[in-house]
Image (cartoon, rainbow, N blue to C red):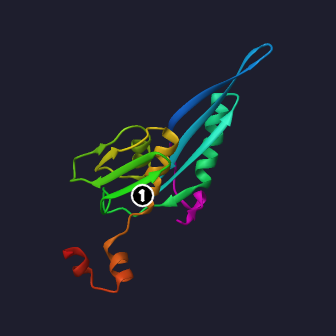
Amino acid sequence: MAQRINPTQLGELKEKLVFINRTAKVVKGGRRFRFSAIVVVGDGNGHVGYGLGKAREVVDAIAKATDNAKKNIVKVQLRGNTIPHDVVAKYGAAKVLLRPAAPGTGIIAAGGVRAVLEMVGVQDVLTKNLGSTNPHNVVKATIKALLQLEDVHSVAARRGIDVQKVVRG
């Protein structure tokens, strides 16, 4: 599992609201509404976190989700403005494919995947959601995929071979 980062060590964190859900509890006097919110935070420089917050008011739910996200920040391995290699990750029924792209491509993604990639600082990437589109699981699958990324030097060190052999295959 990845090392959690202390948010005080980072610069200014941006936040992005991914999804708000409203639930209703039917009581004698009518309906009682509650809200849950999913928020992604990141510094745009390889750090990202997500959080879930629940409350009776939307603003309170978003605030709780943001606080929770700041407690769950992790470091992601990037290569310039894209990711080092293809990666597929699954969380629940959500399956996400991330593929590096040429400069100028942009973020080809939607929903939770786009939010996570924008907050982590990726600018050029191709993605495909292969399973469920449930925002909770899509965000978790995307972060799981990003945590699987490795750079060439760490792969070479792990295998005990030269970097050029890793690049050539």
Q: For the point 36% across and 44% down, which residue is it?
A: 130
Q: For the point 30% across and 56% down, which residue is it?
A: 82
Q: For the point 25% across and 77% down, which residue is it?
A: 166
- Choose between 79 and 133: the one closer to the eye: 133
Can the viewer see residue 69?
Answer: yes
- Residue at the farthest top position: 29
Where is mark 1, residue-wise? 146
Residue 161 relative to residue 72: left or right: left
**Is the residue 162 above or below the residue 90 in the image?**
below
Q: Is residue 136 magenta?
A: no
Residue 159: x percent and y percent? 35, 82
Residue 12: x percent and y percent? 52, 51
Q: For the point 52% across and 60% down, which residue is it?
A: 74
Residue 49: x percent and y percent? 53, 52
- Residue type beneath disc 1: Leu
- Choose between 94 and 7: the one closer to the eye: 94
Query: SS of the residue at dot 1?
Result: helix
| Residues in magenta, as a range | 1-15
Can the viewer see residue 44?
Answer: no
- Residue at the farthest left position: 168
Tell me the quarter of the picture where residue 108 sits. Answer: top left
Residue 14 relative to residue 37: left or right: left
